[in-house]
Image (cartoon, grey):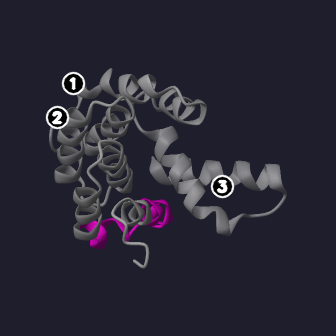
Amino acid sequence: RYQLGEDAIGRQLKTECGRPLRAMLPLRIFLASILLMPMPSHGYFLALMTGHTSRLRDTPASVVEKYKPGMPFYGHVHGKICFGQAEMGEYEASEKNGHLALDSFPLDSWTYHGLAHNYEESGQALRGSKFLENGKPMWTRGITFSDHIWWHTGLFFVQLGEFES
């Protein structure tokens, strides 16, 4: 299913741009994962693009009860909730969902991103910096999102006054 969706997105990009976009592979994978995730992911993606933060929490929360540990996408749904809750200032719940997500799927860069937002927005720069440092072997393995997580790592250094780092 994933490969079919990724291929379809690639064909669409080729049709619209007139040539294959191999450099766009990370974007294609990201879009495929969002569009094929069996939850109201289109709504999540639109909320992300339009800044509707409550929907970033409420969209995955509307289906989370259908997912049980060990099921495909269990961790991903909790990771999506983690980010939405962080954006809504629900830091304790966000952290709980983030760790549920990472316990299920330790390579989920979106969850590392959500927890980075949580620690940054709740004024826990040292905790966030240590969290990203400890998780670096996991979130740096992905190609889609690691550059942005490096940016969050830099923000923690700035908040901590470690400008040379």
In the image, residue 124 lies at what x, y percent? Answer: 26, 51
The quarter of the picture where the C terminus appears is bottom left
- Calculate the distance from the C-alpha at mark 1 to the C-alpha at mark 2: 7 Å
Q: On screen, 131 above or below 40?
A: below
Q: Nearer the viewer, mark 1 or mark 3?
A: 1
Which image quarter: residue 37?
top left
- Residue at image point 22% right, 69% down: 134
Q: Which numbered disc covers residue 68?
A: 2
Could you say which is closer to the camera, residue 37 or residue 1?
37
- Residue at image point 18% right, 47% down: 99
Q: Counting other residues with Cα less than 10 Å from the Cα at mark 2, is it few (<14), some (14-19), or many (20 or more)?
A: few
Mark 2 and 3 residues: CB-CB less than 8 Å, in contact? no
Q: On screen, 142 above or below 18?
A: below
51 horizontally vs 58: left or right:
right
Which image quarter: residue 81?
top left
Mark 2 vs 3, N-terminal side: 3
Q: Which numbered disc covers residue 10?
A: 3
In the image, residue 13 lies at what x, y percent? Answer: 72, 52
27 horizontally vs 89: left or right:
right
18 horizontally vs 120: left or right:
right
* Boundaries of the magenta span: 135-152
In the rendered structure, which amino acid carries the disc numbered 1? Glu
In the image, residue 146 lies at what x, y percent? Answer: 44, 65
In the rendered structure, which amino acid carries the disc numbered 3? Gly
Mark 1 vs 3, N-terminal side: 3
Residue picked out by circle 1:
65
